[in-house]
Image (cartoon, coloured by chain):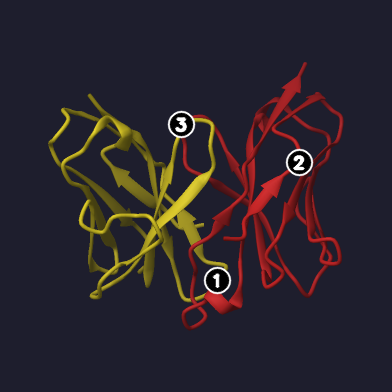
Amino acid sequence: GAVVSQHPSRVICKSGTSVKIECRSLDFQATTMFWYRQFPKQSLMLMATSNEGSKATYEQGVEKDKFLINHASLTLSTLTVTSAHPEDSSFYICSAGGASRETQYFGPGTRLLVL
Amino acid sequence: GESVGLHLPTLSVQEGDNSIINCAYSNSASDYFIWYKQESGKGPQFIIDIRSNMDKRQGQRVTVLLNKTVKHLSLQIAATQPGDSAVYFCAENNDLASSGGGADGLTFGKGTHLIIQP
């Protein structure tokens, strides 16, 4: 399958600061990228869907002003957690999707800890 | 909203034995299902998928069974190995949520922690 990377893999920040997480598809052009959040011992929950060059679509209950998504190219999407709080501490995972439903590849995840 | 769920949170299996992980889904419109393996601190890893026009699909040491009548999905792993220890998630989506045929956001089940005992 395709390779998707995330940076950073881990980040610790102070409450009130903003954190940017990058998601890159390294060997294919992703039509769509998805952002998921996973709390400890829980499942992945879809946060938002982003298409290159257009605004992201957020799932119900996800604040678009808090989780800013930018999808500037077919290989890069960024998620910015603004004014992070301890309850935002989680494992953030992106996936990159291609032209068919079968082509969706997950990144390794970013562990965010907000103190 | 509707969601995908699992029957067992933890499954312990002897090395070499077969394991079966189950998943119940409630969205009758779901027509595409995927099983993922997730090791601690890593992203999900694709194992096998199946479309709703099939009831069985086999891969290397894995088989997925789909029973649309009772909305049940299972993953069978043959001859389990220590490296199979992980959390397994089923995931689904449906054509109604599709945006032009490309990849869609997935709804994940709760996960089953598979433990392989030596």
Say if B11 sits above or below B107 in the image.
above
Task: Look at mark 2 in the image and give the residue it sits on.
Answer: B7
In terms of image quadrants, where is residue B52?
Answer: bottom right
Q: Residue visible at 86% across and 66% down? A: B69
Colour yellow maps to chain: A
Give x and y (percent) for residue B97. 53, 74
In the figure, is residue B117 to the left or right of B99?
Answer: right
Q: Are marks 3 and 2 in contact (CB under 8 Å)?
A: no
Residue A51 is drawn in which quadrant? bottom left
Q: Residue sitting at 52 percent across and 77 percent down?
A: B98
Amino acid type at circle 2 is His
Does B85 appear above or below A44? Answer: above
Quadrant for the N terminus of chain B in the image: bottom right
Q: Is residue A28 visible?
A: no
Find chain B in the image and tell me its colour. Answer: red
Q: Determine whether label 1 and label 2 are within 8 Å by CB.
A: no
Q: Identify the residue shown where x is 47% and y is 57%.
A: A105
Q: Which mark is residue A101?
A: 1
- Determine the residue positioned at 47% across, 50% down: A45
How far is the residue under mark 1 from the one under mark 2?
Answer: 26 Å
In the rendered structure, find residue B41 and report the number of the disc placed on it. Answer: 3
Q: If the image is split into quadrants, where does the C terminus of chain B sit? A: top right
Tell which residue pokes out farthest to the top in this image.
Answer: B118
Lateral position of residue B56 relative to residue A58, left or right: right
The mark nearer the N terminus, 3 or 2, is: 2
Q: What is the CA distance from the residue labelled 3 to the residue labelled 2?
A: 23 Å
Q: Helix, strand or loop at disc 2? A: loop
Question: Residue B61: percent from the left, percent from the top?
Answer: 79, 45
Query: Distance of mark 1 from mark 3, alpha carbons?
Result: 26 Å
- Vertical placement of residue B22 versus B91, above or below: above
Q: Does mark 3 fall on the same chain as mark 1?
A: no
